[in-house]
Amino acid sequence: MTRTAKAAAAALVVGLLASACSQGSATRSAESTPGGKVTLRYLTFSAAPDHVKDLDKIVTAFEAENKNIDVVVETAPYDEYFTKLQTSIAGGTAPDTFELNYENFVTYAAAGSLLDLGTVAGDADPSVYAAESLAAFKHDGKQYALPASFSTVVLFYNKELFKKAGVPEPTADWTWKDEQAAAERLTDRKAKVYGDYQPVQFFEFYKTLKQAGGEFLSADGKKSAFNGPAGIKAAKWLVGKVGKVMPTEAEIGGTADYDTNLFKSGKLAMWHNGIWQFAGLKDVPFEWDVVVEPGDATKASAVFHNAVAASAGTKHGKEAFAWARFLSSSGTAATTRIESSWELPPVADRSVLAGYLKAPKPANRQAVFDSLTSIALPPVIKRQQEMQDTVTEELANAAAGRKTVEEALTAAAAAVDKLLG
Amino acid sequence: MGKVVRYALVVLGALVMLFPFAWAVITSVTPDGAVLATPPDLTPDDPTLDAYGRLLEAMPFWRIVLNSAWIGAASTILQLVTGAMAAYAFARLPFPGRGVLFAVYLTTLMVPMQVLVVPLFIEMRMFNLVDTYFALLAPSIASAFGVFLLRQAVAQVPKEFDEAAVLDGAGHLRIFVSVILPLIRPALATFAIFGFMASWNSYLWPLIIIRSPEFRTIPLGLAELHGQFTTEWNVVMAGSVVSVVPILILYVFAQRHVIASVAQSGLK
Amino acid sequence: MTAVKTKAGPKAGATAGPKAQGRRRLRYAGTVALFLLPSAIPLTLFTLVPMAASLWTSLHEWNLIQPMTWVGLGNYAELLGDAETRAAFWHTLYFIAGYLPLVYAGGLGLAVLLNRAMKGRDLFRAIYFLPVITSWVVVALMWKWLLNPATGLVNQALSLIGVAGPGWWTDPVWAMPSVILASAWKDLGFVMIILLAGLQAIPKEYHEAARVDGAGGLRRFRYVTLPLLSPSTFFVIVISLINGFQVFDQVHVMTGGGPAGATQVVVEQIYDLTFRYGRAGMASALSWLLFAVVLIVTVVQVRAQRRWVNYG
């Protein structure tokens, strides 16, 4: 034992010294190397696990054009992305550039964590971006991030189930009523086939609220406005599906990816989900397509935006901007995203997107662009996450029958007002 | 209790325990389309090792396993050495304030890691240690859990054993090394397993302190398989199966060669 | 490692003067330091210092991405009057009250069963240990499926005997029992292995002596095994309580605190406050409230151990 202990101790000391000296490439080559080469860190959540190679392609193309810049990619899973980002900002080691989604953008812009890109943009032409996408990442009149990708939510449907039930396939003109009628006819409890699936949560609610003609926040953004007739109608529309044309919370039982699997196994006729699902549905053994979501008083489609921002503390503002711009608007980035079905580039030139329409499945890819004509952006406040969690929880209470829709919305409105206050 | 009843009980319980692992193995060989079907398919039609292949393709998995293995081994050895020594002091070396100091050790277990990671990160930043192997190891050089477990074991050793050694003129270090350590081998082996497991499964700290892909550990690698919207569960399960195997081997080894040998020899 | 040799036995210095006594004392202090410093230094640097920092943080409002602002005891005042905090503590106590008896009784039973000679014993021990080393992500997926109210194996089995199974995860009343069940199942092997190590450290002679005295199996268990196992039992209970108060992983991956907040435990609340809601100061304050509770519980146990824990 003595000898083993001694050997172990010796090995440890050596190991510790060795490891203390070995650092990762990101810090080893710290700021800039003698050759004047700049190392730029980029933290992202949207690349892993499926698109790491696609991002590599964009990085390689960028580095070929900018020989003095070395981009180091760091990835974190979405669930813990903000944990990691916040801690590195708290420790004063924020990555030079990082990804932000639209909902979280305001929190960081308002906190002063982001570099005003206007100060480093030079004479870069802003007209390459779709105007509304660019505007989404302005705060107090300053451009704090560049839109890098977007995706929309559409209505997926299983053509074979429609055929079997003798129900005409959905069209762009459908309203909630059409959807409901079809869903009821398509639901076959005995065969465990469901007509419809729309998650009961914050993101679906703000969108259906808009479809019903309501607003989530008051015009000045200081109070909630969803606890009215339109809000009640929207919440009832979502909650009313549960247990009738859609499985109940108990049937789902917290199963991971329940709806995805239900649709993939051919037992779900209509499915409200995002275009990020396209790649995963490539090989399903039945015909399916998509259509713009049915509206009520009006049409409204949810759009999710991701953007690239630079840290307020970066020492390489110009390089950070060059990378952000390349990642968000270059031809390489756009075609790479389109070819790999990795969301869409928010470019003004729609011809760049032509390739997207040519991909085989689903046939009606045009619906993705049609959905952009009337978009609903999520309401954004400083205490965003708490608002989302509260609204989702109250809607779940209504869906499970623990509260009436009216009670749930009143409670949610009170909580949101408190968060705004 | 009859022998048959006892055996039946143990076997039945074992089946219940084995089930999730078997389920993970089954899911890992299920082809993409059929993963997580409801109700689940416990006998997939055409099992495939695809998921394991994709696991190796998606990331340098062996490199990641190697990282986890050596960090786990290093932190286990460190904790065993520091823990056993402290345990000896707390059980055998009376000094003023010993009780209070032991209480201070225990208090380090009472604040959740979730609230310590941010200050610890800032501290590492001040030492310029962010993104290093040392920073990964730092919080697990010493473990109060280990000190506590081993102190209980040292305290259980009858004092007559040390007194005999003292009469032979042995000092504390020799008593510790040649009398106490061999006698607490079951506890050391037990703690080795827990120490290794804690490091092997630790997630939040590595997530925050590590940037470079070459330092990734298994939990970080597995977490990367969870996308924002979709997860490839068969690959996740394949990764989980692979990650359980080394600890299982360690456990069986410790069980066979350390815990059992002591039991059979009746401690003497 | 054997370079420093100290002789602090009763013989040395028994007849020496005060000078030698002082030197001996110094040497003894050196010995104590030698044994303690390897653990004391890292624990101080990497746990106690961050703990002190979090105490400082708890007096501030801080969202991690902006400089902190001083609020004094404001966070504590807000927490003490907060219904959600009280609920989080109740949920945590509920968890412990269900989990601890289950896991201790189960683990002890297993340890005793698997301590006796039987065919395939090593294999069984390894199997019972499997859940301990399987990650919570996998375990949670599996239990969610087993306890699925509609299609899960458990409710299907219950319906065979004519019982309508509850909603488990999806029902606020049953969510915590579900978490407790899954946790106890996973940790049985942990308790088993610690108690096994304790059982094996009991010299066989004691059992034989009791047997010679005519004590039966149950009596031997009651009067030999249990008292001699008490240090291990004490350890298991103290550690399970400390871990129980900090229950997080399983809740985080299984229910995320839901449904309707029914499983929102203290550390889940701390995590949400720090990393989701940008209230790191509040989270630190909450963790110090938790600390106070755990400390009191542990001190009571350490005090009480003198009455029932039997050191060799």
Image (cartoon, coloured by chain):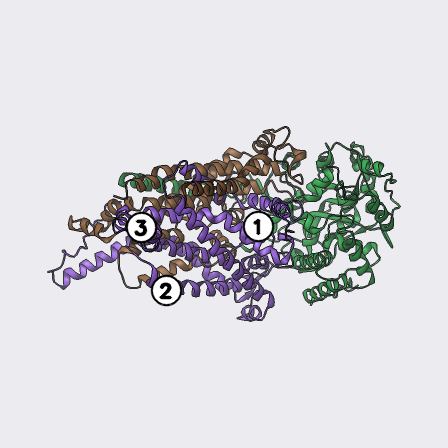
Chain colours: A green, B brown, C purple
Give residue B156's position: percent from left, percent from top.
30, 52
In front of the other: A121 or B175: B175
Identify the amino acid type marked 2.
Ala
Measured Cα–Cα span from mark 1 to mark 2: 42 Å
Q: Nearer the viewer, mark 1 or mark 2?
A: 2
Identify the amino acid type marked 1.
Lys
Any mark on residue A84, and which? Answer: 1
Any mark on residue C304, and which? Answer: 2
Residue lying farthest to the left in this orientation: C15
Few, some or many C-alpha atoms within 10 Å of disc 1 (few <14, some 14-19, many ≥20)? many
Q: Which structural element holds mark 1?
A: helix
**Which quarter of the figure is the C terminus of chain A placed in?**
bottom right
Q: Which structural element holds mark 3?
A: helix
In front of the other: A241 or C226: C226
Residue A1 position by quadrant: top left
Identify the amino acid type marked 3.
Met
Give residue B188's position: percent from left, percent from top.
35, 45
Residue of label 3:
B85
